[in-house]
Amino acid sequence: MNKKGGVGKTTISLYLSQSLSEQGEKVLYVDTDPGSSASKVLGFAENELAKICTIADVLFPSTDVPLKDAIIERKDLPKRKDLRKRKDLPNDWGFDFIPSEKGLNGWEQSWDPGKEYKIQEKINQLNTQTNTKYDSVVFDSAPNFGYLSTATLIASNGVLAVTTPDWLSSEVLSGFLRTQSQVEARYKLNTKIVYVVINAFDSRTTHHHEVCKGIETIVSNLIEWNKENGIQQNIRIHDEIIPSRIRIADAMSCGVPLKEYPDKTGRDLCAIFSNLAEKIAQEIRKK
């Protein structure tokens, strides 16, 4: 989560979900961003999203579709094209998926009392609607903090606050973390784990090192502010920093998992996301 776009929320959430599935977990990935970036990476065109069941159909009172009816199983993700060999290839990321579409924007303005609890209710109902039991549900959220992000937060046991090591992103992160703390206090969600994940770090850049130190100060100040305001929150900067690598951008633009890049860079990146997934899962399981 973050109120700023372009920091890598979709990238991190997709590869985190892929890593969790490779560690043996049954994972459901839910796209709650009306921009539907994750849906497009996974092979759905804009015009196709308007024709299929999405998270919008689940949330709008006028449709109120059961969550199970919006799930696309991993084997049913759209085939992707290998342009060099002119053939379709499997598109197996390892997780089941619920897409989003731009019509979800209207849900923010819709009249639906208590709608901030809607995603949580739908997730809870899922256990009684299907025999499939998910170990993890991962959300990709919109770059704002409206009803959608609030509903996603209420339904979650942990938060990944993704940022990049530049001045503007760190400023937005500071505001986001404080807002997130206030929302948690408002809805009495003080058992959350909040991990700040730094993405696209370039170790050669002095500015990136300086901003990372600044992010440490932001988190320390927030912890003190939470104490002063009686807000209990477990927040920390994750020690797995995601490096800036063109391989990640290549994989995302082609809509393929990093595991399909067998070179050293691909293996190293897979190891980073695997460690990130394992540590986060362990922390959340403690709750």
Image (cartoon, helix red, strand yellow):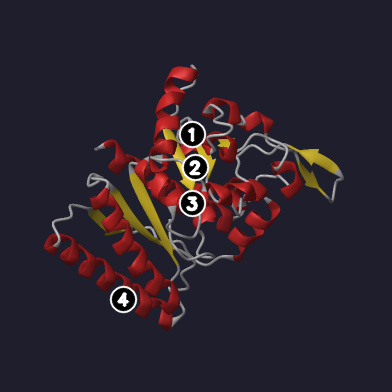
Residue under label 2, please give it.
Answer: 17
Q: Position of residue 110 (x, y in %)?
A: 51, 46
Residue 196 in the image, given as x and y percentages of width and height: 35, 59
> What residue lies at 27% left-to-right and 57% top-to-bottom?
182
> Whole-percent x and y of residue 162?
43, 60
Q: Contact (CB < 8 A) between labels 4 and 2?
A: no
Identify residue for label 1: 27
**Residue 185: percent from left, percent from top:** 23, 52
Label 1 sits on a secondary structure element that is strand
Callout 1–callout 2 Cβ contact below 8 Å:
yes
Q: For this view, does 97 lie left or right of residue 182?
A: right
Residue identifier under label 4: 214
Q: Earlier in the sequence, mark 1 or mark 3?
A: 1
**Other-residue count near label 2 (Cα within 10 Å), few / some / many at <14 / 14–19 / ≥20:** many
Whole-angstrom CA distance, mark 4 to mark 2, is 29 Å
The residue at 39%/53% (across/down) is 160
What's the amino acid at mark 2? Ser
Residue at mark 3: 141
